[in-house]
Amino acid sequence: MTLNEQMTRLAQQAKAGSRELSRLTTADKNACLLAMANALEQNAAAIKEANALDMEVGAKMGLSSAMLDRLKLDDKRIAAMSKGLREVAALPDPVGRVLDERTRPNGLKLRKISTPIGVVVIIYESRPNVTADAASLCFKSGNATILRGGKEALNSNLAIARIMIEAGRRTLPAFPEHAIQVVPTTEREAIKELLSLTQYVDLCMPRGGEGLIRAVAECSKVPVIKHYKGVCHVYVDGEADLQMAEAIALNAKVQRPAVCNSMETLLVDRKVATTFLPTIAQRLGEKNVQLRVDAEAEAILKAESGKQKAEIRSATEQDWFTEYNDYILNVRVVDRVRQAIDHINHYGSAHSDSIVTRDEACAQQFLAEVDSAAVYWNVSTRFTDGGEFGMGAEIGISTDKIGARGPMGLEELTSYKWLGIGNGQVRG
């Protein structure tokens, strides 16, 4: 079987699976999801065994420690996957919601209702927990999903999908077995072949680095929802509670530096820079974070060289645009909120940005003028996440402006159609 034939078969099966999915009741879907959640926990040993093979592959590929952390599955992360599935089961069914109703002067009744999108392809790197998150959200929203993870996570992804499908089959005789599929090959051309099948595939959502997402967007013939990168900022205003600012900055950078909502640039108001920068540099240095700083920040930190432990380099123009996914942080001193907003809107990726301040007027200006999918006041950027937003698991984060924006949960995985009910009306 050629690669084209293999991908065509996969897509045809998914289309058939999406039709079968549409016949399931909310109770059917929830019962399957709960069974899948239990099965993942019960088969944790098998998942970890498969993941150990992937960790070996990742190490041989030379993945960084941060990227290997994204790949690793342990009992805590498997439990989190199961928890995510249970949360999705507990959420309202997004399909069949009445979005609009109207009656025209001629008596024609119109109703706009939410519907599944159909067949959704998810392409992602590392993080095998995405397999469970994406599959559960697509399943609950009535969409068949085709999952294509990175070659470094193939064993984990296949194991997770197999366990979920087997649990669904045991729970429901009418379980559509092709509603959840994993692309079984790591060949790059498979993506191009799959995303050319517009008669079967309705949407593609890539999750990963900028290179992956741009490659997918350029080759795809089906619509793509994307975020190219997460260049996220925290701005510490001159009226900030500096203890709060320190906690937020540390959390935003070092809790999980390899994820897209971690901070890549710290902006500090000149008013508090000489007080705040030496302290935060010392704390970041303790976490082995390298700082790439502008001239003003460099002068302040070198004057306090006895207090800071972080490695310091001069930032280049390109650094301000860069998503590191690592223990590297840009630092710039700015003149009040106006310059911070201008910096973010120029260098940022419209993902997640935060201001720390006690000045409400300043905060409101920041919230209104920063053009990102998620904008925060006195909060870490790490909260841009479907689970943290109460959506259950998350299919991805969109920085597009058309359609979904920000964390994508169940509602963002639906389309709609109009129902017209009449009694013989004809148009004159």
Image: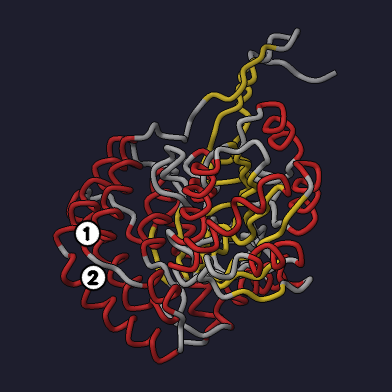
Residue 340 position within the rendered picture, expressed as x and y whole percent measured from the top left: 75, 48
Residue 84 position within the rendered picture, expressed as x and y whole percent measured from the top left: 33, 48
Q: Residue at x 62, y 21 (%)?
A: 100
The crowd level at tag 2 (other Cα within 10 Å; few <14, some 14-19, many 20+) is: many
Asked if 50 appears above or below 421 in the picture, the reply is below
Asked if 70 appears above or below 189 in the picture, the reply is above
Left or right? Give the position of 189 relative to 218. left
Residue 223 position within the rendered picture, expressed as x and y whole percent measured from the top left: 67, 58
Tag 2 near tag 1, CB within 8 Å: yes
Determine if residue 402 is in view: no
Secondary element under disc 1, as helix, strand or loop, is helix
Left or right? Give the position of 132 relative to 400. left
Viewer-closest of 72 and 163: 72
Amino acid type of the residue tagged 1 in the rendering:
Leu
Q: Residue at x 34, y 81 (%)?
A: 54
Secondary element under disc 2, as helix, strand or loop, is helix
Amino acid type of the residue tagged 2 in the rendering:
Ile
Asked if 22 appears above or below 162 in the picture, the reply is above
- Which numbered disc covers residue 47? 2
Left or right? Give the position of 309 relative to 402. left
Viewer-closest of 114 and 232: 232
Residue on which disc 1 sits: 40
Left or right? Give the position of 37 relative to 189. left
* Between discs 2 and 1, the one toward the N terminus: 1
Residue 313 position within the rendered picture, expressed as x and y whole percent measured from the top left: 66, 76
For marks 2 and 1, give the CA distance: 8 Å
State which quarter of the image contains the C terminus.
top right
Determine if residue 91 is in view: yes
The crowd level at tag 1 (other Cα within 10 Å; few <14, some 14-19, many 20+) is: many
